[in-house]
Amino acid sequence: MVRPAVSLRSTATAPGLPPPAAGRSRSGGTRARRWAAVAATAALLTTLGSVPAIAEGPATPDRAADGARPASPAHTPPGTPEKTPVAVGYGGAVSSVDQDASAAGIEVLRRGGNAVDAAVATAAALGVTEPYSAGVGGGGYFVYYDAKRKRVSTIDGRETAPRSAGSDLFLENGKPIPFAQAVTSGLGVGTPGTPATWDSALDRWGTKSLGQVLRPAQRLARDGFTVDETFRSQTADNQERFADFPASAKLFLPGGKLPVVGSTLTNPDLARTYDLLARQGVDALYRGEIGRDIVRTVRTPPVAKGADRTVRPGDLTRADLRAYAPRSQAPSRSHYKGLDLYGMAPSSSGGTTVGEALNILESAELGRVGKGATASEGEATKGGEKATRQSEKRFLHRYIEASRIAFADRGRWVGDPAFEDVPTRQLLQQRFADARACLISDDKALTSPLPAGDPRHPKRCDASGTASPTPYEGRDTTHLTVADKWGNVVAYTLTIEQTGGSGITVPGRGFLLNNELTDFSFAPITPGVHDPNLPGPGKRPRSSMSPTIVLEDGRPVVALGSPGGATIITTVLQTLLNHFDRGLPLVDAIAAPRASQRNSATTELEPGLWNSPLRAELEALGHRFTKNREIGAATGVQRLPDGRWLAAAETNRRGGGSAQVVFPHETAPTGR
Ligand code: GLU
């Protein structure tokens, strides 16, 4: 992570660039809307100039005091642009939450790698700079569009439960153990899927070796990255538990203290881990010495002497690691207003839930934001303001209701399909969505928990089933999106579950272990009703990760995803609606204030909506709200009609993201 000094590059044409390809002339409402959205990006670029930069640390941090080295620019490759949430140009694009990580992907693209190579390079770099969200100790979901074959494929790299796990994994004396104790334990650790995902993706679609794509991340781990405010505050959130594990404390609390903003944090152990993976392949983890250390750490968590904490061991074995295999599976597929959406099928609930909610909204008119307007600008006139608010209110109401319904169905039906009879296809049928959409009234909000429908036997307007509330899921993870010059696209979300995962670093290896198994239900959510998300031997806990690639006329137009536990689904859904229905430029669609309804009594609102008159207007319909400071941290890429790629990231959330392209070329589009 480097300081998010948000700034805009001046418009420039890179020497030797091809001229913009002539836009293909097509008709169609969605395309017209999107193109207007692209044009509005120019206006947005101006507004972004006022995004407040996060407080910078001391220019010369006290080395003795914090144990970290002063910042050195050596780790950022020369020519890396300053952190910015939007970039437009040719040669491929990378968007992630972190500038060094995006730069790692761009470096690989520049060296001739494709989107898959760059995605793995970016992910590995995130393992260094975002170690509390992602790394080789976790898992994730990889969605890939292959331009040559015109096909979308996915890898389910979710962590698995030990083969000894039963449905009572988290029960003691018949009662669920406290959630917080499960989080910081060996018990919550699943077999990591991330190294196998990288290996499988490179093997099937990449052009570079694991060793080649790990190089930028290795360098970053060895030379260090600059600590920013987000990293420091995430460390502060974990300080107490990190202090209880000497290996975590040594790595993340240099000199026993929080790392200073502006200082450089190195991770030589992780550099060596990456080196070992580069030389021996991922067998070093699934069959070799790294795996041995993981198993030892899970079975005998290395707690500091005198730590006042119950840390339960887990029953992970070397046989569990050897048995791990990433799943290659068909993507979830849904159609929405002329678009084709591809995402993750179960074990993630992302694809089915985003898809079902969109199907519910298929025939809803969600209203465009005023022509050329951005979320922050609004309409100029008073009458216009009123009309805009009415339209926003209608949009939010319908979006919230669609999400509420889709979550009711997710909770009842989605689990690991290797263990459960998941009605994936039926959940995505328009017939089912229509039966569910009929529950929505324009005048009155539904109440939650709302009963699930039955996708195999859809009944119109039926709300007579059993209601299952949505359980809590961790809120941290990271998403990256990559496109290359050949038109291949990757949307990849990876995680170690909650911020800081289990809190347990594998001694000498430089990475944290996940706590992904806490995504299982500890006990049936609704007594007497089958819960598809109970633990089982080798089972994958249900996820909400929603890496998504959107095709129009058979070509990718947008890819995106987000962290945020169950709010991932609503963030992806709302961003898609903001962009495709409301007509916002992608970066504005990402920046817009979020609402998240997950079949719970209240809908969460970010301050931008909480403080708006819209809240009272929606409350008048029966909606109830709670405030959430920040929901999600999305990134995306968009293919512009003239052939350029646009990378987009957060303007503010998590300190702002980093959008980069290989050859910036930002002149305003000249029409289509
Ligand atoms: N464990 C969560 C999931 O798989 C992700 C955690 C997060 O996004 O923070 O859905």
Image (cartoon, helix red, strand yellow):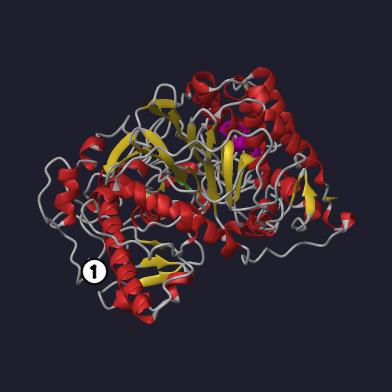
> Which of these two is toward me, 530 or 438?
438
Question: Where does the magenta region start and end?
Answer: 119-125
> Which of these two is toward me, 483 or 180?
483
Q: Quadrant of residue 147?
A: top left
Kindly report the secondary structure that dominates the magenta region of the rendered protein: helix
Question: Relative to 133, is 672 on the left or the right?
Answer: left
Question: Relative to 546, is 113 on the left or the right?
Answer: right
Instruction: Give the percent coordinates (x, y) of residue 9.
Output: 67, 52
User: Label 1, on which residue?
Assistant: 445
The number of discs equals 1
> Which of these two is toward me, 336 or 439?
336
Kind of residue at badge 1 = Ala
Other-residue count near label 1 (Cα within 10 Å), few / some / many at <14 / 14–19 / ≥20: many
Disc 1 CB within 8 Å of nearest ligand 1 atom? no
> Which of these two is toward me, 104 or 468?
104
420 lies above or below 530 = above
Question: Relative to 223, is 653 on the left or the right?
Answer: left
Q: Secondary structure at mark 1?
A: loop
Q: Quadrant of residue 47?
A: bottom right
Residue at image location 27% in from the left, 41% down from the top = 335
456 lies above or below 447 = above
Instruction: Give the percent coordinates (x, y) of residue 403.
Output: 30, 56
Instruction: Give the percent coordinates (x, y) of residue 465.
Output: 15, 54
* Whether residue 548 is visible: no
57 lies above or below 348 = below
- Residue 500 included in the magenta stretch of the image: no
Q: Quadrant of residue 102?
A: top right
* Whether residue 15 is visible: yes
- Quarter the C terminus occupies: top left
560 lies above or below 599 = above
Instruction: Give the percent coordinates (x, y) of residue 111.
Output: 67, 27
Residue at image location 50% in from the left, 22% down from the top = 205
